Image (cartoon, rainbow, N blue to C red):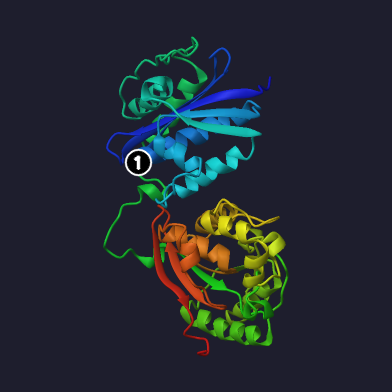
Amino acid sequence: MAVRAVVVEADGGSRGNPGPAGYGAVVRDPATGEVLAERAESIGTATNNVAEYRGLIAGLEAAAELGAAEVDARMDSKLVVEQMCGRWQIKHPGLRPLAARAAALVDRFESVRFSWIPRDRNRHADALANAAMDTAAGKPSRAVAGSAGGEPSRAVAGADSPGRAQAREVAARAATRSTGTDPATAKASWEPRPSFTATRLILVRHGETEWTVQHRYAGRADVPLSESGQAQARATAARVAALAPSVAAVLSSPLSRCTATAEAIAGALGGLPVRPQDDWIECDFGDWDGHTFAEVRDRWPGELDAWLASTRVAPPGGESFTEVGKRVDRAMVALREAYPGETVVVVSHVSPIKLALRDALAAGDALLHRLYLDAAGISVLDMWPDGGVAVRSVNDTAHLPAR
């Protein structure tokens, strides 16, 4: 039977940081403290923070499976709590996909409240995480004890609980796994990595439109290429064909300024089909669409200041950069999995390309307002299966006439 409200306690740990890691999560009835669900898993080699995020994700998934509408998420990780509340930036690129997964789960509930608790009040989740790591290492599992600290008496799952059984099963599989694909576990190295094992992504901003020249916000409005933009698209097509004679796919935002640019590139590559992808569409600027930058400053000064100050703030009636980032991350993961070792061209807009480069460079949100991307500019990055990334060029415009 579905429950209205639940408490989620989550934890994760790593024996080495990075080292053998695992997580634990407990879902409780907030009134009685009764355990409604447990989740635990060994995740191979990872950092503490990765394991903590994985624990949160597992706890939210369990709450969703129970049909909960309200969640009180409690963790002893200050970093995860502050980042999920939007008070701390997520600087590590390996944590951003995990935070995005957690945020997507949060959107499934009516309300989610995050709070930090001392470690001694998170003993149950911590014990589940350690039990999963012990099992993966072939050690006897530690007994799981209930939490202390003045909370209601809680039922503690027995040794053969479904959560514990799941931990043993998954941990056994994890013990035989040598590598993972989480970006945070990819080893840092000064040595160049072989490009033939990477998915190469050629990111192209569409050619110029009349709104580009007029400095207008162009979000979901389907503004076509200008005559100059069409010439830029042809020049860009020749440049991309020289950069990558062999391309597996040409993907595009569904808006015509991108599909027209993509069709020129596809033609130069031998007539590949252009595949529209909704995740690469421009940010929805809402009420600002079609207005000049100066007009927005005059008519919406407070809203503009708030938008510039936080990626979580959306223009009136529009979409925040945080929301755009979630779909861009989803699209990047899909590309890496669908085209291993191949080259893919993506024709998109300023905002999605900036967000992809921000994450690839492990940069902060300030990059979004400091990086300039020209119409028909080209950026190139490589993505490896283990999460490694190399940015090879940003905003290449050598193929365009000087202005």
Question: Which one is nearer the viewer's eye here, 90 or 21?
Answer: 90
* 257 w.r.t. 57: above or below: below
Q: Is residue 253 visible?
A: no
User: In which quadrant of the rendered view does residue 5 lie?
Assistant: top right
Q: Position of residue 272 (x, y in %)?
A: 62, 74
User: In which quadrant of the rendered view does residue 28 lie?
Assistant: top right
Give the residue displayed 49% in from the left and 16% down from the top: 161
**Mark 1 Cα within 10 Å, few/some/many (few <14, many 20+)?**
many
In the displayed structure, does residue 189 sit left or right of residue 244?
left
Give the residue displayed 46% in from the left and 43% down from the top: 83
Question: Which one is nearer the viewer's eye here, 385 or 352?
Answer: 352
Give the residue displayed 68% in from the left and 22% down from the top: 2
Question: Which one is nearer the viewer's eye here, 396 or 134?
Answer: 396
* 380 w.r.t. 85: above or below: below
In the displayed structure, does residue 25 sit left or right of residue 261?
left
Q: Number of marks in the image?
A: 1
Q: Is residue 142 visible?
A: yes
In the displayed structure, does residue 393 sit left or right of residue 310?
left
* 334 w.r.t. 223: above or below: above
In the displayed structure, does residue 317 sit left or right of residue 401?
right
Q: Position of residue 168 (x, y in %)?
A: 42, 25
Q: Position of residue 180 (x, y in %)?
A: 40, 45
User: In which quadrant of the rendered view does residue 321 lie?
Assistant: bottom right
Amino acid at dot 1: Thr
Give the residue displayed 71% in from the left and 70% down from the top: 290
Name the outermost residue toward the top: 153
* 111 w.r.t. 93: above or below: above
Would you name the residue on which mark 1 appears?
A: 47
Q: Position of residue 10 (x, y in %)?
A: 46, 29
Name the quadrant of the N terminus: top right
Q: Secondary structure at mark 1?
A: loop
